[in-house]
Image (cartoon, grey):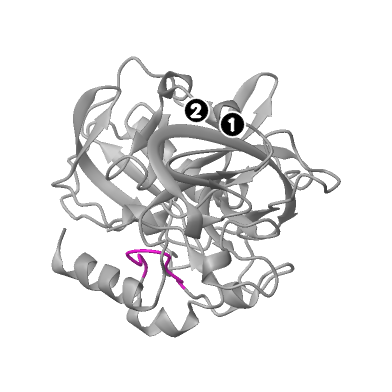
Amino acid sequence: MNWMKITKVTACLALGLVTCPASAIIIRHDVSDSEYVVEDSEFPALVDLFYPGDCIGTLVAQSYLLTAAHCAEDLDNSDTLEVNGVTQDIAEVMLHPQYNGWTYDVAFIRLEEPATGLNPYGLYRDTDEQGQTITLVGRGLHATGLEGESGASVDGNLRRATNVVTVANNHWLKVEFESPDEDGVTALEGVGAAGDSGGPAFIEVDGEMLIAGLNSWGDPPPGGGNNDIGKYGGIDASTRVSSYLKWIDSVLDNADTNTDTTTDTSTKTSTETATSTDTSTVIDTDCDSGATECECNECGCASSSGHGNGWWALLGMLALCRRRTRGG
């Protein structure tokens, strides 16, 4: 753990944020936890980026993991990952060229060698996500909607939960954590939590799980504070993959046509073919329909070690929102 991470965690604790450690799926209190727990083998193309319960990348091509930029920005070319039981060197970290510590929260991690024995996941390419059921996957601390993150514990199990997309705007897919007595609650209702950053939000199409979102951040229920993150009524948000397909495809297309190119030795890069605004779905505003005050102010609010640019300047914004991020 480097000095910056230590300092950030110390500041987090000083602010009374008892959920600084990384955490995972928050579930219904009236459904057995065993219904949410799944074997790692059910999602073999998911890769822990730092340690179990601390950011996830998902294989979308044999040498490429898709994840949240606020996770990837803490990785270096000198780091290694365990991919399907094989230690892999990181060849390159590619953040979206317009990532600003809040929006455009999407990134690639290129592996030195292609992963073997795994089938990459496909991407959800339609823009009809609103009203659809998504499946969120993560591991680490867990709790129910009664306790939220502040009452969470840890066991290292992988869990998945479902929810219905209530808002699909220019940057985010948002879901609300409904209590068991509400209309529309799903059988395995749940939300992500700190530490689930970058983890996939799947939409199933003809039996195939496609990545529609990348877990990014969450807000407490209306009128709640930091200790209410993960409780019923709260909001969970994932980066909307369909909004960034122009850039995503440019990276993957470049991978297909330039497989013999020399590895870029920089640790934070973007492809030369994708330097303009990703205009296929995203418009040039952060305060679009359905945006919260936090989004409009581009706060990189941190629930733990505080990824993102200008972290210290954002400490005062912590009451507005919570960033899904590492435990340090």
According to the picture, the residue beneath numbered tag 2 turns out to be: 121
Q: Residue 141's x, y, as percent?
A: 43, 46
Total numbered badges shown on the rendered structure:
2
Q: Between marks 2 and 1, how big is the CA–CA gap?
A: 6 Å
Q: Residue 13's x, y, as percent?
A: 33, 72
Q: Residue 42's x, y, as percent?
A: 48, 20
Identify the residue at the far top of this view: 117
Q: Residue 74's x, y, as percent?
A: 27, 57
What amino acid is labelled 1 in the image? Leu
Regarding residue 95, the answer to whether it shows in the image is no
Residue 211 part of the magenta segment:
no
Give the magenta-colored segment's residue range.
Answer: 300-308
**Horizontal side, residue 203 vs residue 262: left or right:** right
Q: Quadrant of residue 232?
A: bottom right
Do tag 2 and tag 1 residues touch (Cβ < 8 Å)? yes
Q: Quadrant of residue 256?
A: top left
Report the quarter where the C terminus lies.
bottom left
The local secondary structure at tag 2 comes to loop
> Looking at the image, is mark 2 or mark 1 earlier in the sequence?
2
According to the picture, the residue beneath numbered tag 1 turns out to be: 210
Task: Examine the rendered structure and indicate whether residue 222 appears above or below residue 137.
Answer: below
The local secondary structure at tag 1 comes to strand
Q: Which mark is residue 141?
A: none
Predominant SS along the magenta part? loop
Q: Within 10 angstroms of label 1, few (less than 14), some, or many (20 or more) residues?
A: many
* Residue shown at 42% from the left, 80% from the top: 314
Q: Within 10 angstroms of label 2, few (less than 14), some, or many (20 or more) residues?
A: many
* Residue shown at 41% from the left, 24% from the top: 40
Residue 301 part of the magenta segment:
yes
* Residue shown at 38% from the left, 37% from the top: 155
